[in-house]
Image (spheres, rainbow, N blue to C red):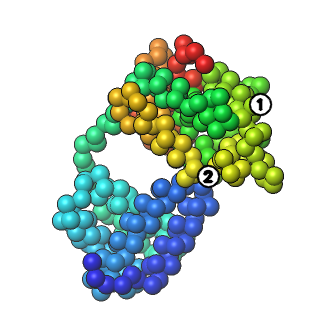
């Protein structure tokens, strides 16, 4: 699409994305927001709109039509629209615009496709895939067990510090989106594997300088978001799995296990998971601490 981005709009978008980073939003989320905003700014520039304050609901409706004309999936259009709504809400909150044009644009209603949920057998295969004889294998097993037990997000998992972990009480302090802190339970199996990693694996991986992060890589550097994703990518394609397992699959798997339990409370689970939304039970994305207590460590 021809046309250069709006200079002021670009600076405001950069400020908005910096705000998200400071509030510990995941790199993937920030990438999506940035892509949506750059696309919007190019579209506005092609229409001769060079002042972000001049954007009207009609302009945003035109942009949505433009996205649909490009035959993007409804879910993608909705994601872009929500990113733009969040951006203009930020501008209004900071008094950088007088009116929020996105407030008058109705959301698209579409049927959400339920993502596949790993089975109990899938999770057993995946959790037993790491070679726990070597330090990196112990680390990977501890990571996967922690993700399955707590249901925390990938960025939250990567950001765990030693001081966040309380194995005596089997709890974990998590700093999530918006710098909101919460304490989540850690199941017995996860606590066991974390303990083994701390005792046997981690001493071989820690660096000479910063020893506060929980997870380290083979080069003795703290494991960052991309490194954590590579762990899931490596083991998520283990032989025998019925579907490809991603970090978010762990949340879906635990959601299913939780909802199958007597007295399961979807809203309580979503709060413990750090989610701010509620959806029908069939689609809720939450978790349960140590979903499969019968598993053998």
Q: Secondary structure at mark 1?
A: helix
Residue 224, numbered circle: 2
Dots 1 and 2: beta carbons under 8 Å?
Answer: no
Q: Position of residue 94 (x, y in %)?
A: 55, 70
Quarter of the image with the N terminus is bottom left
Residue 48 is left or right of residue 294, and the answer is left
Foreground tag (1 vs 2): 1
Q: Residue at x 48, y 29 (%)?
A: 126
Q: Residues within 10 Å of mark 1 (few under 14, many from 20)?
A: few
Residue 218 point in image, percent of width and height = 66, 47
**Number of marks in picture:** 2
Along the polypeptide, which appears first: circle 1 or circle 2? 1
Q: Residue furthest right?
A: 208
286 versus 101 height, above or below? above
Nearer-the-camera pick, 7 or 95: 7
Query: Residue, x 65% and y 28% (percent of image)?
Result: 133
Q: Which residue position is annotated with label 1?
A: 199
Question: Residue at the location (47% across, 16% down)?
Answer: 261
């Amino acid at each position: 699409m021809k046309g250069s981005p709006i200079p002021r709009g670009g600076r405001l978008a950069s400020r908005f994305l910096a705000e998200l980073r400071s509030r510990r939003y995941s790199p993937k989320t920030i990438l999506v927001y940035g892509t949506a905003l750059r696309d919007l700014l190019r579209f506005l520039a092609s229409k001769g709109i060079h002042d972000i304050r001049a954007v009207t609901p009609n302009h945003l409706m035109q942009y949505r039509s433009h996205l649909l004309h490009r035959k993007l999936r409804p879910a993608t259009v909705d994601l872009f629209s929500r990113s733009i709504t969040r951006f203009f809400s930020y501008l209004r909150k900071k008094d950088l615009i007088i009116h929020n044009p996105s407030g008058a644009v109705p959301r698209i209603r579409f049927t959400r496709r339920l993502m596949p949920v790993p089975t109990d057998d899938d999770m057993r295969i995946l959790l037993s895939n790491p070679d726990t004889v070597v330090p990196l294998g112990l680390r990977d097993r501890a990571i996967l067990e922690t993700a399955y037990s707590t249901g925390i997000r990938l960025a939250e998992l990567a950001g765990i510090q030693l001081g966040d972990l309380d194995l005596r009480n089997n709890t974990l302090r998590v700093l999530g989106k918006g710098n909101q802190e919460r304490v989540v339970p850690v199941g017995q199996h996860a606590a066991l594997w974390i303990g083994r990693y701390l005792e046997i694996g981690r001493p071989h991986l820690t660096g000479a300088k910063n020893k506060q992060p929980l997870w380290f890589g083979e080069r003795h550097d703290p494991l960052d978001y991309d490194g954590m994703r590579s762990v899931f990518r490596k083991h998520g394609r283990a032989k025998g799995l019925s579907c490809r397992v991603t970090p978010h699959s762990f949340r879906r798997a635990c959601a299913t296990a939780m909802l199958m339990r007597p007295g399961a409370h979807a809203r309580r689970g979503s709060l413990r998971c750090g989610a701010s939304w509620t959806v029908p039970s069939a689609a809720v994305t939450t978790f349960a601490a140590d979903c499969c207590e019968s598993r053998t460590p």
